[in-house]
Image: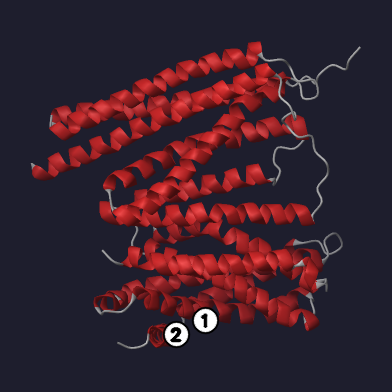
């Protein structure tokens, strides 16, 4: 019986390769992200609202929406290929299956985020400089949180009648704590505030990740098994 | 009429009677609240919304917690009665949350000057409402009963565990963002008429919860009985 | 003479009416569902 971690990585690699071949999820998400950034930029009045006030919210709304688009597309492609059924027949531990899917989704959403970030800097005239490592850390933590719940819910949504509508409706409340924490921390990082001001939010994010990744991993078998 | 559907009809009838009694008792609460309690000096008549808003909050919280607990128990014990109960409790919870979300802003406007504020209570109610709606929407979208029960249970448990995080987020937001001082809606020590009215109202709302959930549970039983009879025919 | 409490009776009325409407409306909805099932079963 192969080591579950290696199994998870293998599953993740398979999904990533499949996505690299078709590129549907990544393309939609990237176009979407660019669109949102451009619209937000033209929507504000620069004399009234400084870029730095609005920037963290815009960035995270973009990330959140792009993540939802990516999650939806990724699972739809999976369903069309009926690949999941084959995997389920094999004696693969469900936790490894979830972990593999999670890693693949993180790779997709992470890619979108990494491409969005320079666009964001460009359109909003924000220099990241010293804030960059902190920002990358916050992005990673928050993304893990809502992609974990998103991976579980998209496995459910795909089996329902209104899959495209189901996922956002179910996922939205769960995205709120990581998003609020991420926006608050991003705002402070960009303003070069000391770490002490962000400590509470950081702990919230870390706790959220631990609780929900574990929970979703355990709940995955209840979703995919009869 | 089959045995199962006769039993279901009995449950439905009991539930309807119980909730009808609750509604009549609510009329009594209205009389108490409007006539018997004193008018609060700083807040005026609008303060009396308190006698409906707080018990509704209690019932919504009760509904929500029971959905979470029933969901956890269902995944462990796989008893369909738990799933049926969770669904009933969720639907009733939506009703009480709706009352909270309407009376809350109606109370807030004259007292705090604004329809909405992101304070802990209102924010949590809003999210519990969204979670309920998502839960019920999911149930409507899944056809197979066993799958529906499993999926709902997962969402129920995750939802229950989300609530402390929302609470924590609001708390962090408020401690790091000092808010303007607002009037607290309830006086620190309640005169006896106010306290008794509040307690009576809470009892009535609990009675309504029990009546409604019983009815809803019975209706689910009746639906299943009808499906089974149709399948057998 | 102590200050008059604020005149906000209309909010009170609105809240009490809405609550009553929601609760009674839900009862009626449940009752109608019950009737529909009973009459439906009669046909089966």
Position above or below: A47 against B219: below
Q: Chain of mark 2?
A: A
Closer to us: B117 or A199: A199
The quarter of the picture where residue B208 lies is top left
Tell me which label, 1 or 2, sits earlier in the chain. 2
- Mark-to-mark CA distance, 1 and 2: 8 Å
- Label 1 crowd bin: few (<14), some (14–19), many (20+), radius 10 Å: some
Residue A181 visible in the picture: yes
Closer to us: B92 or A14: B92
Q: Residue at x 62, y 81 (%)?
A: A114
- If the image is split into quadrants, where does the N terminus of chain A sit? bottom left
Residue marked by disc 2? A16
Q: Which mark is on residue A107?
A: 1
- If the image is split into quadrants, where does the C terminus of chain A sit? bottom left
The quarter of the picture where residue A64 lies is bottom right
Position above or below: B71 against A81: above
């Amino acid at each position: 019986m192969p080591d579950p971690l290696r199994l998870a990585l293998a599953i993740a690699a398979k999904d990533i390769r499949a996505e690299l071949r078709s590129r549907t999820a990544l393309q939609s998400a990237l176009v979407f992200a660019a669109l949102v950034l451009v619209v937000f930029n033209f929507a504000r009045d620069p004399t009234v609202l400084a870029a730095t006030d609005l920037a963290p919210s815009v960035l995270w709304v973009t990330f959140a929406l792009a993540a939802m688009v990516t999650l939806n597309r990724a699972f739809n492609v999976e369903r069309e290929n009926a690949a999941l059924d084959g995997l389920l027949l094999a004696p693969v531990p469900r936790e490894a299956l979830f972990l593999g899917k999670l890693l693949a989704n993180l790779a997709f959403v992470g890619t979108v985020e990494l491409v969005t970030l320079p666009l964001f800097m460009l359109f909003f005239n924000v220099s990241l400089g010293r804030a960059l490592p902190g920002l990358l850390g916050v992005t990673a933590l928050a993304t893990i949180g809502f992609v974990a719940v998103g991976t579980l819910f998209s496995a459910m949504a795909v089996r329902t009648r209104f899959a495209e509508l189901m996922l956002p409706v179910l996922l939205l409340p769960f995205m709120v704590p990581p998003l609020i924490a991420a926006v608050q921390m991003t705002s402070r990082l960009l303003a070069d505030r000391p770490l002490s001001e962000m400590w509470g939010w950081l702990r919230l994010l870390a706790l959220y990740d631990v609780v929900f990744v574990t929970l979703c991993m355990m709940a995955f078998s209840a979703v995919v098994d009869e | 009429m089959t045995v199962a559907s006769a039993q279901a009809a009995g449950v439905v009838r009991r539930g309807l009677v119980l909730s009808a009694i609750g509604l009549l008792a609510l009329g009594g609460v209205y009389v108490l609240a409007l006539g018997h309690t004193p008018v609060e000096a700083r807040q005026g008549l609008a303060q009396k919304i308190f006698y409906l808003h707080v018990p509704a909050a209690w019932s919504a919280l009760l509904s929500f917690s029971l959905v979470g607990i029933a969901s956890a128990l269902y995944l462990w014990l796989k008893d369909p009665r738990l799933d049926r109960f969770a669904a009933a409790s969720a639907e009733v919870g939506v009703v009480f949350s709706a009352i909270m979300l309407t009376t809350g802003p109606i109370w807030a406007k004259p007292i705090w000057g604004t329809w909405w504020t992101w304070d802990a209570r209102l924010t949590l109610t809003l999210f519990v409402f969204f979670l309920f709606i998502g839960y019920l929407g999911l149930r409507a979208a899944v056809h197979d009963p066993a799958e529906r029960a499993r999926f709902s249970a997962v969402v129920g448990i995750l939802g229950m565990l989300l609530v402390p995080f929302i609470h924590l987020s609001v708390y962090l937001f408020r401690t790091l963002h000092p808010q303007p001082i607002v009037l607290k809606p309830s006086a620190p020590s309640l005169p006896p008429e106010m306290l008794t009215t509040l307690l009576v109202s809470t009892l009535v709302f609990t009675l309504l919860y029990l009546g409604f959930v019983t009815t809803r549970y019975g209706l689910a039983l009746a639906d299943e009985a009808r499906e089974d009879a149709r399948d057998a025919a | 003479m102590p200050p008059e409490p604020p005149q906000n009776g209309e909010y009170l009325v609105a809240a009490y009416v809405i609550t009553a409407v929601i609760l009674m409306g839900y009862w009626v909805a449940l009752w109608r569902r019950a009737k529909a099932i009973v009459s439906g079963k009669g046909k089966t």
